[in-house]
Image (cartoon, rainbow, N blue to C red):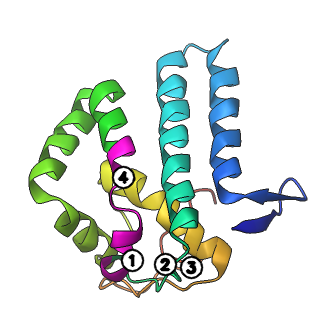
Amino acid sequence: MTRRSSWLHRETSIAEAFERRAARATLLAEASINAAALTFAAGLYRAQAQVVTALAAHGAALTGSVEQDLGAFRSALDAIVRYAGEAGPPGLRAGVDAYASEGPARLIAWWRGPRAGRTDYLARALLRPYAETLAATGVVPEPSAGPASPPGGCPCCGGPAWIK
């Protein structure tokens, strides 16, 4: 799975993009008062890269329905869950405990729910590799059950812009 990286103007794989983010976070952590958060982000990006690699290795065509596609990457999500549980802040560790009891139903509900104003960080972290893979391969995700995306929202997921 490759895509054209518009901000670097070169071909790169989706997994390499996550690895590049991890390297940047690690570099920034060296001289930052926010080193702990940046170090956590670097590890999270690396775990997410593993999920992208699993999606690529599976080779199945993705449908955009997380319920149908989850089998292609569910076991790979364990790397993110394990990392968040070991290195994440207390609130995220509580999310890991909840995910352990709710499992895929939590991800499916989050994916299908309204995407604006969502605060389930663990669900977002778990599904980000899938969402980026969909976007890079041109697969349109199933519509959310929530209201239409706000003006300026993401044309792929319907979520609000992170930077305005």
Under circle 2, the secondary element is loop
Label ID, residue 156: 3
- Cα separation between marks 3 and 2: 6 Å
Residue 65 placement (x, y as % from top left) = 38, 83
Give the mark nearest the N terminus, 2 or 1.
1
Disc 3 to disc 2: CB gap under 8 Å: yes
- Cα separation between marks 2 and 1: 19 Å
Under circle 4, the secondary element is helix
Label ID, residue 21: none
Q: Which residue is mark 2?
A: 158
- Cα separation between marks 2 and 4: 23 Å
Q: Which residue is mark 1?
A: 69
Crowd around label 2: few <14 · some 14–19 · many ≥20 (10 Å): many
In the picture, measured across the screen, residue 89 lies left or right of residue 1, that is left
- Cα separation between marks 1 and 3: 17 Å
Tell me which segment is drawn in magenta.
67-80
| Residue lying at 39% horizontally and 53% vertically, measured from the top left | 76
Q: Nearer the viewer, residue 84 or 79?
A: 79
Crowd around label 4: few <14 · some 14–19 · many ≥20 (10 Å): many
| Residue lying at 51% horizontally and 79% vertically, measured from the top left | 60
Q: Which residue is mark 4?
A: 77
Position of residue 10 relative to residue 16, above or below, is below
